[in-house]
Image: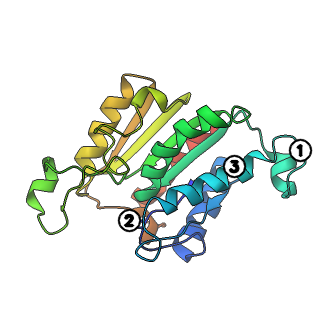
């Protein structure tokens, strides 16, 4: 299941950048992808996006018995190897929703979580955030900051494995690294940093060599 980014404000599965990315990932990883649509702010403020995504996950779960409304899911999915993958705000959604899957949908097993340039914030700037006061407004809302009370406990984000990908010039890089280090205490986690690039660079130039490397890392993670 893929959760697109866009700061909960923009983008959709139908956007060409995401449609092409998901098609490429499906082919590279030999995976069937459900690209999740959700309502966006400001017309639909949070947590509506999370609830829409949860509804989609529940819809996917109706196929476990083989009698759901989508034949591709009925016939071609191993529900013991479900992956939650997202970029930016979508990575935040994967983190938040994984514990709900474990608690409520025992027929689905989350095999892995892919977190691409995760969109996490905090009220106290760290690392690159200190040099960018325009973009860094900070937030300790538990939907956005995984390190505060009210956010899912890291040990509740249950999966067999995880990969966290960051970009060297991304203002979100340092919180992504902190997230990786926190998760590493609970499970197997891979970490990969793309040097010289900024936030979700791979979406804008998928033929760029570094974008191909990121795709290869993610596809290999899913395949293996």
Kindly identify which residue carries mark 1: 66
Dot 2 or dot 3: first in sequence order is: 2
Residue 76: horizontal and vertical position, in percent?
83, 47
**Residue depicted at 53% across the width and 70% down the height:** 39
Secondary structure at numbered mark 3: helix
Which mark is first along the chain, 3 or 1? Answer: 3
Q: CA distance from mark 1 to mark 3?
A: 14 Å
Which quadrant holds residue 14?
Answer: bottom right
Query: Is residue 113 shown above or below 129?
Result: above
CA–CA distance between discs 2 and 1? 35 Å
Locate residue 122, reporting x and y percent. 22, 49
| Depth order, front residue of 5/9 | 9
Quick check: 187 left or right of 61? left
Image point (30%, 37%), residue name: 149
Instruction: Identify residue for label 2.
Output: 7
Where, quadrant-wise, is the C terminus in this rendering?
Answer: top right
Q: Which residue is mark 3?
A: 58
SS for callout 2 = loop
Q: Is residue 191 left or right of residue 47?
A: left
The mark that comes first in sequence, 2 or 1, is 2
Instruction: Determine crowd level at label 3: few under 14, some 14-19, many 20+ residues with C-alpha closer than 10 A.
Output: some
């Amino acid at each position: 299941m893929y959760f697109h980014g866009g700061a909960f404000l923009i983008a959709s599965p139908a956007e060409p950048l995401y449609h092409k990315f998901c098609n490429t990932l499906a082919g590279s990883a030999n995976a069937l992808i459900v690209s999740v649509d959700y309502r966006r702010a400001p017309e639909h403020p949070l947590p509506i996006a999370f609830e829409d995504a949860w509804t989609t996950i529940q819809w996917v779960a109706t196929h476990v018995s083989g009698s759901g409304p989508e034949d591709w899911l009925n016939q071609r999915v191993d529900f013991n190897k479900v992956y939650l993958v997202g970029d930016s705000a979508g990575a935040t959604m994967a983190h938040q929703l994984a514990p709900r899957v474990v608690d409520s949908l025992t027929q689905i097993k989350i095999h892995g979580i892919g977190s691409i340039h995760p969109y996490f914030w905090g009220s106290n700037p760290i690392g690159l955030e200190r040099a960018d006061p325009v973009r860094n407004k900070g937030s300790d809302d538990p939907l956005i900051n995984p390190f505060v009370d009210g956010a899912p406990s890291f040990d509740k984000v249950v999966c067999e494995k995880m990969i966290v990908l960051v970009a060297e010039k991304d203002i979100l890089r340092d919180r992504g690294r902190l997230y990786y280090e926190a998760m590493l205490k609970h499970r197997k986690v891979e970490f990969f940093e793309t040097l010289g690039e900024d936030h979700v660079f791979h979406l804008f130039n998928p033929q760029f060599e570094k974008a191909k490397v990121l795709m290869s890392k993610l596809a290999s993670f899913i395949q293996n």
